[in-house]
């Protein structure tokens, strides 16, 4: 991190302005080489300065240049931001001049990576930067802002502090057993502390599932045999005709996707090819893809035709989704019933059609009920929100299970202490107190350029 990096921070295209960000020990010096106006090395920090970007005697653009000196910047390094007129040619030319004069093109997410490595933000706050950018609903925005402001990180820090105090008491008992004025840390005392720790850690894990839903949305896969009305349901949910609907079986041969905002939660809808035995090569590929989608779904909507008896394909599909969160939608309820509902073991059975407006609302309400969306709406948004964070919290809970078994066996206190330290360390990984270089490189590579 000894070099100076530069990148275009706004979307490249036609617009009112483009912003190029430069960060590093030579940021001011490099920009000064191509800037005509006040000497940037002499201006006050956190000021905006009017001038021109020049290439020797040629004026490239009229600009505003913001100068922010270390350490009170996003990266804690000297940062300069050049506000150019929007446009591909002009922006690229300014960027080219910066690179020719000593800057290096930033890697994706490198500005945020430097902010993390320099101690400006922790890992949860770093991940929230991209979440703010990618937020598609107001709930996702609120969650990301809470993380960016450090509220979620503070919950983890407070938890680690309690664990550290417990560890300190155990250490004192082990190292100084002759002291009479210290609390004796017996296995029974540890058991009481574990009850308190489990309650808090379980709450973190449980509520974090809501955070993932807010941030990532609910991947909802619509499955069923051909001609049961899957594409019609997709179109009604989206409120426009995204999928082609005909009476011909096998019309949908590939994945059709769309998104809706359901009470502030993004519902990622996936319409699939009708599942049946087929000799058509193209349709067979579509069926295989449909079955693959089931494995990665957060919610399955299996559609059955009210006007038809259940087939072997229906029973096979019901068996495949029995351990998934699923809704069985009996479609075409306006037609004569031929289906036997007693043959369906799933309790989440609803009857709908795509003709009446209130019938599709039954499906929406069922989804809200299954994912407790009303409860999420009343929450404080202090959640962990992605797979990395949640998996580390769950791993911590699994280690706690080991500690409780050790306590039940009345294992030596110094052995129990080892696993309590593992919980403390694992929670530290959530906020980046402990990390590997490979993790950091992989995480920030997913960021956009210039951030």
Image (spheres, rainbow, N blue to C red):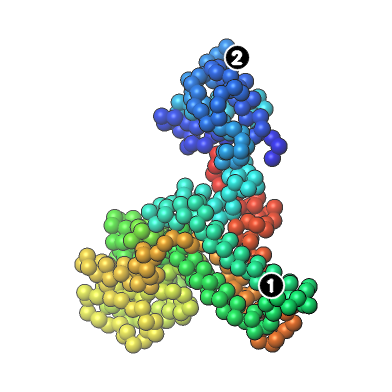
Question: Which mark is on residue 89?
Answer: none
Residue 422 vs residue 449: left or right? right
- Picture quadrant of residue 264: bottom left
Q: Which residue is mark 1?
A: 169
- Please name the residue shown 70% across and 86% down the image: 410
The residue mark sitting in front, 2 or 1, is 1
Check the image and report above or below for 285 versus 43: below
Residue 2 vs residue 389: left or right? right
Check the image and report above or below for 107 versus 340: above
Which numbered disc flags the more N-terminal residue, 2 or 1?
2
Residue 331 at what x, y percent from top left? 29, 73
- Please name the residue shown 42% across and 54% down the image: 142
Check the image and report above or below for 445 versus 191: above
The answer to whether residue 290 is visible is: no
- Please name the residue shown 73% across and 71% down the image: 171
Residue 130 at what x, y percent from top left? 51, 49
Q: CA distance from mark 2 to mark 1?
A: 68 Å
Q: Which residue is mark 2?
A: 56
For disc 1, the neighbor class at 10 Å (few under 14, some 14 to 19, many from 20) is: some
166 and 354: which one is in front?
A: 166
Report helix, strand or loop for mark 1: helix
Q: Quadrant of the N terminus?
A: top right
Q: Residue furthest top?
A: 57
For disc 2, the neighbor class at 10 Å (few under 14, some 14 to 19, many from 20) is: few
Q: Quadrant of the C terminus?
A: top right
340 and 65: which one is in front?
A: 65
- Picture quadrant of residue 332: bottom left
Residue 427 vs residue 378: left or right? right
Count of residue discs: 2
- Please name the residue shown 55% across and 14% down the image: 58
256 and 227: which one is in front?
A: 256
Residue 281 at what x, y percent from top left? 48, 63
């Amino acid at each position: 991190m000894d070099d100076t990096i530069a990148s275009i921070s706004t979307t490249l295209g036609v617009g009112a302005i483009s912003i190029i960000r430069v960060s590093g020990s030579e940021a001011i010096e490099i920009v000064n080489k191509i800037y005509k106006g006040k000497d940037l090395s002499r201006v006050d920090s956190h000021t905006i300065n009017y001038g021109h970007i020049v290439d020797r005697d040629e004026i490239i653009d009229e600009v505003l240049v913001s100068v922010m000196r270390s350490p009170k910047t996003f990266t804690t390094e000297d940062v300069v931001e050049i506000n150019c007129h929007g446009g591909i040619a002009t922006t690229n030319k300014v960027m080219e001049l910066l690179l020719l004069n000593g800057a290096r093109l930033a890697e994706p997410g490198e500005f945020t990576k430097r902010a993390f490595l320099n101690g400006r933000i922790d890992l949860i706050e770093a991940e929230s930067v991209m979440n703010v950018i990618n937020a598609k609903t107001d709930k996702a925005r609120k969650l990301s802002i809470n993380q960016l402001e450090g509220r979620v990180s503070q919950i983890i820090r407070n938890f680690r502090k309690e664990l550290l105090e417990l560890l300190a008491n155990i250490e004192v008992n082990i190292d100084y057993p002759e002291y009479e004025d210290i609390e004796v840390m017996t296995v029974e005392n540890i058991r009481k502390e574990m009850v308190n720790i489990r309650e808090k850690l379980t709450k973190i894990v449980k509520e974090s599932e809501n955070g993932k839903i807010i941030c990532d949305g609910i991947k909802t896969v619509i499955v069923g045999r051909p001609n049961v009305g899957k594409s019609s349901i997709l179109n009604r949910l989206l409120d426009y005709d995204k999928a082609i609907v005909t009476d011909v079986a096998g019309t949908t041969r590939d994945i059709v996707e769309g998104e809706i905002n359901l009470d502030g939660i993004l519902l990622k809808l996936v319409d699939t090819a009708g599942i049946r035995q087929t000799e058509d090569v193209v349709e067979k590929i579509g069926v295989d893809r449909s079955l693959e989608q089931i494995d990665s779904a957060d919610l399955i909507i299996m559609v059955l035709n009210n006007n038809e008896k259940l087939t072997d394909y229906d029973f096979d599909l019901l068996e495949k989704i029995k351990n998934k969160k699923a809704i069985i939608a009996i479609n075409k309820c306006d037609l004569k019933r031929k289906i036997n509902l007693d043959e369906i073991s799933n309790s989440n059975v609803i009857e709908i059609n795509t003709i009446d407006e209130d019938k599709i609302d039954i499906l929406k309400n069922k989804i809200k009920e299954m994912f407790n969306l009303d409860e999420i709406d009343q929450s404080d948004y202090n959640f962990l929100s992605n797979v990395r964070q949640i998996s580390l919290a769950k791993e911590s809970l699994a280690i706690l299970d080991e500690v409780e078994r050790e306590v039940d066996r009345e294992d030596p206190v110094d052995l129990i202490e080892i696993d309590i330290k593992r919980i403390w360390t694992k929670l530290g990984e959530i906020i980046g107190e402990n990390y590997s270089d490979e993790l950091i490189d992989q995480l920030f590579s997913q960021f956009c350029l210039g951030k």
